[in-house]
Image: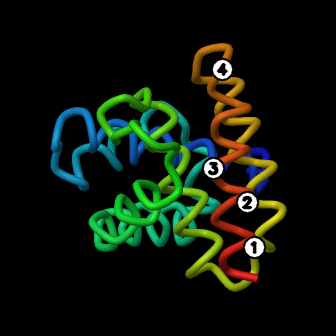
Amino acid sequence: MKKQTRSEARDAAFTQIFQISMHEDDMDVVLSELLRERPECETNLGYITQVTDGVMQHNGELEETIKKHLKKGWSLSRISKPSLAVLKLAIYEMKYVDDVPAKVAINEAVELAKRYGSDDDPNFVNGLLASVYKEMS
């Protein structure tokens, strides 16, 4: 079995966060589905569960951070579900995952937004995360 890259693990974590946000599924069910579909995730299971659990535990705080950086007149409900999951993952990494530099979290988030979002999502994700990053620095 080939070793999974951190980017692939992040992609897997995104799918977990997205699924749970859509269905409020049991974490264990979502995780066992992931491992059945993508057995290579086994190699990064620690990271995947760390960020998935972390995003769920800090969900309220992450949503507040996102709200604070939205343009006037915007609300969370206006953000596409994939972008919202990407933003939560990236902000969680920026704040709580020591071995992921903020700029890497942002770049990876933009790539996820390109892969899973609509045409406007990558620029939106990049702009909001740049604003969060500026505030953190």
Q: Amino acid at mark 1?
A: Val
Mark 2 secondary-structure assignment = helix
Q: Earlier in the sequence, mark 3 or mark 1?
A: 1
Mark 2 highlights which residue?
A: 105
Q: Is residue 64 above or below residue 36?
A: below
Mark 3 highlights which residue?
A: 128
Q: CA distance from mark 3 to mark 1?
A: 18 Å
Q: CA distance from mark 2 to mark 1?
A: 7 Å
Q: Earlier in the sequence, mark 1 or mark 4?
A: 1
Q: Earlier in the sequence, mark 4 or mark 2?
A: 2
Q: CA distance from mark 3 to mark 4?
A: 12 Å
Q: Quadrant of residue 28?
A: bottom left
Q: Is residue 136 above or below residue 6?
A: below
Q: Earlier in the sequence, mark 2 or mark 1?
A: 1
Q: Amino acid at mark 2?
A: Ala
Q: Amino acid at mark 3?
A: Leu
